Amino acid sequence: MRHGATDYLEAITSRADIYRPVQEEIFRAIDDCGAARVVDLCSGGGGPWLSPRWRSALAERGRLKVLLTDKFPSDVLCSRLGADPQLNCVRSSVDAACVPDQLRGFRTIFSSFHHFPDTVACAILADAVRCGDGFAMAEVTSRTLRGFAIISLMPIFVWILTPRMRPFRWSRLLLTYLVPLIPLVVLWDGLVSCCRTRTPQELLALATGFPEYEWSAGYARGNWLAPVFLIGRPKDFSPS
């Protein structure tokens, strides 16, 4: 069930390029911080870093590397990276609120920040600030009519995309078409995620405790979705 849901999320993230509206803003923040490495937290099945557009943007910045991490690493994630020299994954558990010192770099979180209560979300921000690392989170779910309307269509997208997903799994077909548990799980997860996703004002409220950073938040416009984002840069950053 978990593989089926994460396979779908990775497929729609990559094929629909759902984080395209916020891509330029995040790469601008990475460049502003002079980061040579991105540490992606709560990566799950891979997220936007595996999509063609984000890989292309990485290729344009030849020195930039991306490490994909998760507290509960997926055993299929590394196989999705291919031979891309700029992408790698960490097979050991990585806590987003306590990132090991050897994993320094600009931090990103996609589609996961709403999972954390305010205390843990603040701890995630505090850990990035403690290390002086830039931070960006983005989510395509939102407490808006647009967000709920789009999420209500997710079972249809699951049925359409499933035959195109790789690697092929008989269990995925069984749990999508014969016993449609995966579409139901994706729908339920999406609706709950919409309810839990913070507004830009709520995200900025979380960040007020860290005045040493410059924070920006909002809804990124540009396609049928409007991802919500929070981006933080150290005010006194000077490239080493």
Image (cartoon, grey):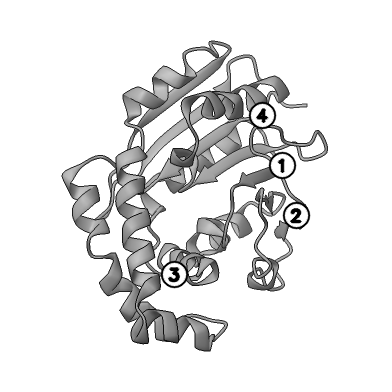
Label 1, residues with CA under 10 Å away: few <14, some 14-19, many ≥20: some
Kind of residue at badge 3: Tyr
Question: In the rendered view of the protein, which quadrant contains the C terminus?
Answer: top right
Note whether 18 is above or below 180 in the view shown: above
Horizontal side of 232 relative to 157 (left or right) equals right
What residue is shown at x 66% (from left), y 29% (from top)? 133
Q: Which residue is mark 1?
A: 36
Give the CA separation, mark 4 to mark 1: 11 Å
Q: Going from the N terminus, do you reach mark 4 or mark 3 first?
A: 3
Q: Which residue is mark 4?
A: 133
Tag 2–tag 4 contact (CB < 8 Å): no
Residue 238 in view (yes/no) = no
Give the CA separation, mark 4 to mark 3: 31 Å
Residue furthest front as drawn: 179
Tag 2–tag 3 contact (CB < 8 Å): no
What residue is shown at x 52% (from left), y 29% (from top)? 121
Q: Going from the N terminus, do you reach mark 1 or mark 3 first?
A: 3
Closer-to-camera residue (15/239): 15
